[in-house]
Image (spheres, helix red, strand yellow):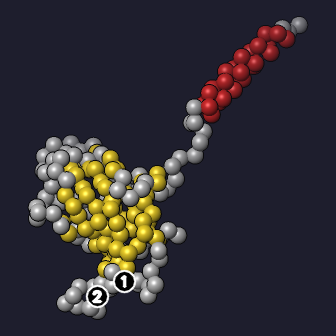
């Protein structure tokens, strides 16, 4: 004759333990969905702390093509303050760290070289904030632009590399996004 209590105990104890772990995980928030593919929502002028940078995004403007050539397409200009947090100076702002898209999704422009509008002409020294303007060419800008655009902020991570000092790579998904009003300066 088999021992029914022993068989029940053999299955009941692990089942209760698994159920307890699932309940504790759910109560601690471990079963909630992630932040989403756009990262957390940030406000204008909020400091965003990244691995090697502190960013404060101020505004987004739609500006005309260059004065000397009005046939050039307009650009979306993102004004921000960037502070490099590394130990040694770096040559420039990391391309791809900031992007612009419509609130419905899809990129609105392609990034050009950032133009530094601070007193310093190039490079970033550690812990020295600099005001920047990033221009994103928008070849298909409509006559009436959207009222709001989304600024995406990506972060970097240190990649293992035994040949060079440091190899930072851009993370593919944003860590934060800001929905900012678009000022048309055309």
- The quarter of the picture where the C terminus appears is bottom left
Q: Where is residue 179 in the image (x, y as percent from the top left)?
A: 45, 63
Secondary structure under the numbered disc 2 in the rendered image:
loop
Separation of residues labelled 2 and 1 (CA atoms): 8 Å
Q: Tell me where residue 150 sits by quadrant.
A: bottom left
- Residue occupying the point 35% across, 69% down: 60
Q: Position of residue 51 (x, y in %)?
A: 30, 45
On screen, residue 114 above or below 12 = below
Task: Pick whichever, 8 or 39, lies toward us.
Answer: 39
Residue sitting farthest toward the right: 1
Q: Mark 1 points at which residue?
A: 139
Residue 121 numbered mark, or none: none
Q: Position of residue 183 (x, y in %)?
A: 38, 75
Task: Pick whichever, 130 or 28, lies toward us.
Answer: 130
Tell me if mark 1 has few (under 14), some (14-19) or many (20+) residues whose alpha carbon lies within 10 angstroms of its own: some
Q: Tell me where residue 119 sits by quadrant.
A: bottom left
Dots 2, 1 in contact, CB < 8 A: no
For the question of whether residue 28 can be seen, the reply is yes
For the question of whether residue 18 can be seen, the reply is no
- Residue occupying the point 53% across, 47% down: 34
Which of the marked residues, 2 or 1, is nearer the chain's N terminus?
2
- The quarter of the picture where the N terminus appears is top right
Q: Where is residue 177 in the image (x, y as percent from the top left)?
A: 43, 58
Secondary structure under the numbered disc 1 in the rendered image:
loop
Q: Tell me where residue 55 sits by quadrant.
A: bottom left
- Residue occupying the point 66% across, 29% down: 23
On screen, residue 153 above or below 64 = above
- Residue occupying the point 15% across, 55% down: 124
Tell me if mark 2 has few (under 14), some (14-19) or many (20+) residues whose alpha carbon lies within 10 angstroms of its own: some
Q: How many labels does the image show?
A: 2
Q: Name the residue under label 2.
A: 72
């Amino acid at each position: 004759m088999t021992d029914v209590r022993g068989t029940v105990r053999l299955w009941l104890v692990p089942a209760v333990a698994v159920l307890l772990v699932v309940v504790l995980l759910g109560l601690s928030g471990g079963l909630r969905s992630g932040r989403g593919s756009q990262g957390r929502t940030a406000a204008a002028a909020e400091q965003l702390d990244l691995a090697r940078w502190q960013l404060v995004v101020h505004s987004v403007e739609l500006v005309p093509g260059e004065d000397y050539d009005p046939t050039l397409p307009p650009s979306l200009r993102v004004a921000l303050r960037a502070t490099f947090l590394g130990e040694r100076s770096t040559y420039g702002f990391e391309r791809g760290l900031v992007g612009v898209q419509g609130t419905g999704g899809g990129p609105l422009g392609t990034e050009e070289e950032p133009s530094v509008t601070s007193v310093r002409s190039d490079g970033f020294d550690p812990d020295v904030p600099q005001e920047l303007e990033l221009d994103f060419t928008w070849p298909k800008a409509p006559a009436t632009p959207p009222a709001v655009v989304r600024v995406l902020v990506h972060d970097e991570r240190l990649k293992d590399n035994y040949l060079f000092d440091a190899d930072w790579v851009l993370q593919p998904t944003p860590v934060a996004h800001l929905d900012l009003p678009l000022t048309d300066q055309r």
